[in-house]
């Protein structure tokens, strides 16, 4: 019987402690019962829905005026020389490391260490043809290769038939990449 009384008393104490934490806030010095106490008005204090302080500071601004959070990685100081290969139809539609689906007709590439969404200029050292590609995957996983190009990039570089070629890779800023891609598209459109 004593154990039962002790257990009941312990449960009653816990219940009292928990309900004490859930009590309504006390009134502030102004006497308004519905306002938040001065202690809870700090920067990290929770704010009630609909209260004036719950409105975002940028309520008057439009999303159309928003600037991008990040323009992408800047790898302008990157340079590498090595062997390039390409991958095509077998990988079409599979997810790349960036989450995009592989499109063999897009100007993309796989690199082991460069940040995803960065752009590089790839120059074929044999015929001096140049393409700009976006890094959207990891690889190549074959020893002695530094970059895997999409079929479209390999075709423009002239290595689709041979399969591999010695290339020079140069990192670009996002602005440089945009200018070079626009020039490449303009030159391909005028040559047809």
Image (tube, grey):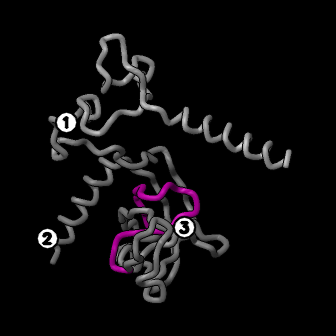
First in sequence, mark 2 or 3: give its number: 3
Disc assigned to residue 190: 2
Residue sitting at 25 percent across and 32 percent down? 51
Nearer to the camera, 127 or 11: 11
- The answer to whether residue 43 of the structure is visible from this angle is yes
Disc assigned to residue 59: 1
Mark nearer the viewer, 1 or 3: 1
The residue labelled by disc 3 is 138
Residue 192, compared with residue 61, is above or below; it is below
Instruction: Provide the secondary structure element on which disc 2 rests.
Output: helix
Instruction: Provide the secondary structure element on which disc 1 rests.
Output: loop
Q: Distance between the residues labelled 2 and 3?
A: 33 Å
Tell me where residue 130 appears, x and y as whole percent. 36, 64
Which residue extends farthest right?
2
The span picked out in magenta is 104-124
Image quadrant where residue 16 sits: top right
How many discs appear?
3
First in sequence, mark 2 or 1: give its number: 1
Q: Does the magenta stretch include residue 62?
A: no
Residue sitting at 73 percent across and 45 percent down? 8
First in sequence, mark 1 or 3: give its number: 1
């Amino acid at each position: 019987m004593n154990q039962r009384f002790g257990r009941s008393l312990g449960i009653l104490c816990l219940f009292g402690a928990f309900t004490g934490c859930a009590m309504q806030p006390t009134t502030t010095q102004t006497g308004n019962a519905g306002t938040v106490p001065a202690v809870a008005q700090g920067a990290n204090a929770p704010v009630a829905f609909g209260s004036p302080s719950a409105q975002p500071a940028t309520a008057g601004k439009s999303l159309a005026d928003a600037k991008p959070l990040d323009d992408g990685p800047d790898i302008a100081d990157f340079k590498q020389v090595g062997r390039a290969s390409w991958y095509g139809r077998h990988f079409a539609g599979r997810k790349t490391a960036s989450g995009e689906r592989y499109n063999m007709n897009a100007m993309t590439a796989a690199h082991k260490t460069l940040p995803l969404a960065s752009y590089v200029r790839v120059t074929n050292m044999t015929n001096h043809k140049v393409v700009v590609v976006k890094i959207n995957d990891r690889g190549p996983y074959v020893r002695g290769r530094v970059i895997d190009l999409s079929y479209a990039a390999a075709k423009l570089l002239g290595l689709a038939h041979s399969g591999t070629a010695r290339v020079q890779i140069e990192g670009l800023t996002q602005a440089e990449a945009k200018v070079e891609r626009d020039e490449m598209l303009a030159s391909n459109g005028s040559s047809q």
